[in-house]
Amino acid sequence: MSSEKLKVAFLGPLASFSHQAAAESFAKTSAELLPHVCFADAFAAVQEQQADYAVIPCENSTNGSVVQTLDLLADRSNLYKDVKVCGEYYLTVHHCLLVHKGSYPGGLPSYDGKITKLYTHPQAWGQCDKFLAKYFKGVERQDVSSTSKGAEIVSKETEADERGGAIASRFAAEYHGVDALEENIEDRADNTTRFLILRNILADRTAGLEFEQPVLNGDAKTHSAVMHKTLISFSIDHSSPGALANALLIFKAHGLNLTSINTRPSLKRAWQYIFFVECSRTPCVENDDAVLNALNDLRGVTESCRDLGTWKDQLGVSV
Ligand SMILES: O=C(O)C(=O)Cc1ccccc1
């Protein structure tokens, strides 16, 4: 069974940015890449051990957190109790405005303003604000399950349909056989999405790869100075002054440097939150138990608290 190819779940259909991230982060293993229609299905595939890993976007450098992913990590109904983060992958994201094949052979200069509907994944709109404000002000926007799905919809349009446009990658344009009216429509050339790599902590098949990118892009060198990141979620008693400050002081006390804080509604009571704290440390013998000890202390000052995993920081790592 362990000689089977690794199975990697991602948001499909093929040619989504998640597909690209999954293919690149597992480039050196002969992994089987499995498209799923939503992030929840990819989480469930890991929980049920139908997939060894899932590659899920969590944050974009232009547009911020992917709230759908935070909500799945919040796991309010305890559906993904064995799913943890074991790695990350940074993908530079370039968007194109895609149209049905042959509809505008002259490219953007020949565009006649007749597109009435745009399709993309909710994450992409905010990455292309300036282009959309300039050329598509007032045009209806329809969220679809992924950028690649948007390209597929435009590819299937008939003459009788309203004209649509999709925001997706060059790769999606080729895969679905549509034209790019314009390329690189993102607001910022450095537009980057961070993907989390998830595994099931009960799965033996992936246990040996702890703290490892499953495959680094290049030779598997060891990075002695590489940082480890840890993600912890918790909720606190909102009526107790200093409850959040007390929780955050625990990270300081254990030498854990805070790198990001996010919140999502608790959905228990209005205006109460689940906090997501990411922290980093350079591993050494002295701080081997820092995360474990911090979690123990956090249990004393929070209502609930969960270790969502530790992995090697890939920011700035080049191999
Ligand atoms: O829709 C996709 O292609 C995805 O994989 C989600 C996404 C959307 C926009 C930027 C990065 C990832």
Image (cartoon, rainbow, N blue to C red):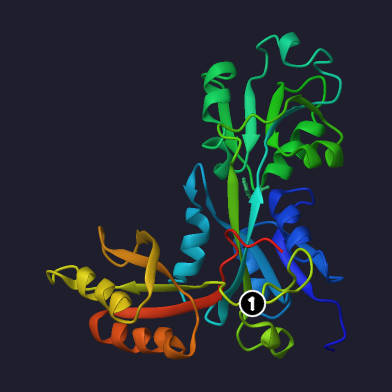
Q: Position of residue 3 (x, y in %)?
A: 87, 86
Q: How many marks?
A: 1
Residue at the farthest front position: 224
Compared to residue 311, the image places residue 72 above or below, namely above
In this rendering, position of residue 282 left or right of residue 8: left
Residue occupying the point 80% across, 26% down: 100
Compared to residue 203, the image places residue 158 above or below, namely above
Residue occupying the point 56% across, 43% down: 122
Q: Which of the 4 image quarters holds residue 213?
A: bottom right
Say which amino acid is labelled 1. Answer: Arg
Residue occupying the point 80% across, 16% down: 104
Compared to residue 16, the image places residue 7 above or below, namely below
Q: Quadrant of the N terminus?
A: bottom right
| Crowding at mark 1 (Cα within 10 Å: few <14, some 14-19, many 20+) | many
Q: Position of residue 282 (x, y in %)?
A: 48, 76
> In this view of the protein, which residue sits in the foreground, 255 or 4?
255
> In this view of the protein, which residue sits in the foreground, 219 or 95?
219
Q: Which of the 4 image quarters holds residue 240?
A: bottom left
Residue 79, can we see it?
Answer: no
Compared to residue 27, the image places residue 124 above or below, namely above
> In this view of the protein, which residue sits in the foreground, 198 or 293?
293
In this rendering, position of residue 83 left or right of residue 204: left
Q: Position of residue 180 (x, y in %)?
A: 77, 27
Mark 1 secondary-structure assignment:
strand
Residue of label 1: 199
Q: Quadrant of the C terminus?
A: bottom right
Residue 74, can we see it?
Answer: yes
Q: Position of residue 12 (x, y in %)?
A: 73, 54
